Amino acid sequence: MALELTQRIRERLVRYWALKAVGTSLFMVLFFLGYFSVLNHPYGSPSVMPLIWLDQWIAFTPYSFPVYASLWVYVSLPPALMGNLRSLILFGLWVSSLCLFCLASFWIFPTQTPRFDIDWKNYPGLAMIKGIDAAGNACPSLHVASAVFSAFWLNRIFSQLQAPRMLHWLSWACCLAIIWSTLASLQHVALDVICGLGVGVAFAVASLNRVKNTA
């Protein structure tokens, strides 16, 4: 069983590998161009997102940075494991729609996280993010939305690959860890995360209702 699963995964990884590699790289380049354009040129002055009771539950954790950065590997898994060209293209269109929705939200309703009393120079990894990403483009959390969207697609892909339940749970655990990291790194506040969850679920459900087969 394990050997059969490994073989199925290997076959999917090599199928359209050039298109997947070029497409994923091009998508990320275009995304970051749009993201930083909106970040630096919002429609109006950003509003500071308020804290709620949930923010008190998640403590600032410096080592959350690697988990936060792991999103870029996690979101690359669904297209890498796609087995047919139609599903690969539709996935690209839907994830692009999700990103455009969030970027439009950032531009029309600019938001930012509060200023926290922390000397970021003591945390080089997080300081790098703070220097590049600033505090804008906060709500909805695109980090959370894309992680949740990818988790739903991976769940469908693993089901059609007849993968063991452990692989499903591992994927959801990675998604939850990424969500936790957005709060633990103070990149987002709880309301950003809640809105990001809503966006991710909405786009995942809508897309998977139209894409039945990833094989």
Image (spheres, rainbow, N blue to C red):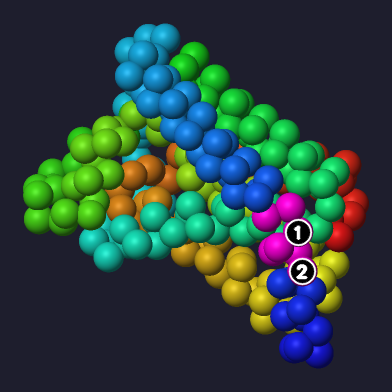
Q: Could you tell me which quadrant the C terminus lies in? A: bottom right
Q: Position of residue 199 (x, y in %)?
A: 63, 38
Which amino acid is tagged 1? Answer: Arg
Q: Is residue 202 left or right of residue 123?
A: right
Q: Residue lying furthest front in this view?
A: 18
Q: Is residue 19 left or right of residue 56?
A: right
Q: Position of residue 54 (x, y in %)?
A: 41, 52
Residue 96 sits above or below residue 70 on the image? above
**Mark-to-mark CA distance, 2 and 1:** 6 Å
* Residue 32 found in image quarter: top left
Residue 134 sits above or below residue 61 on the image? above
Q: Is residue 12 magenta?
A: yes
Q: Residue at the spot x=49%, y=14% of the render?
A: 108
User: Which mark, by number, is residue 211?
Assistant: none
Residue 101 sits above or below residue 17 on the image? above
Q: Position of residue 52 (x, y in %)?
A: 38, 43
Marks 2 & 1, CB-CB < 8 Å contact: yes
| Residue range highlighted in magenta | 11-17
Mark 1: secondary structure:
loop
Main SS class of the magenta portion in the image: helix
Q: Could you tell me which quadrant the N terminus lies in? A: bottom right
* Residue 207 found in image quarter: top right
Please rate how many residues cluster around mark 2, counting C-alpha atoms within 10 Å: few if below 14, some from 14 to 19, many from 20: some
Please rate how many residues cluster around mark 1, counting C-alpha atoms within 10 Å: few if below 14, some from 14 to 19, many from 20: some
Which amino acid is tagged 2? Answer: Glu
Q: Tell me the residue that label 2 is attached to.
A: 11
Q: Tell me the residue that label 1 is attached to.
A: 15
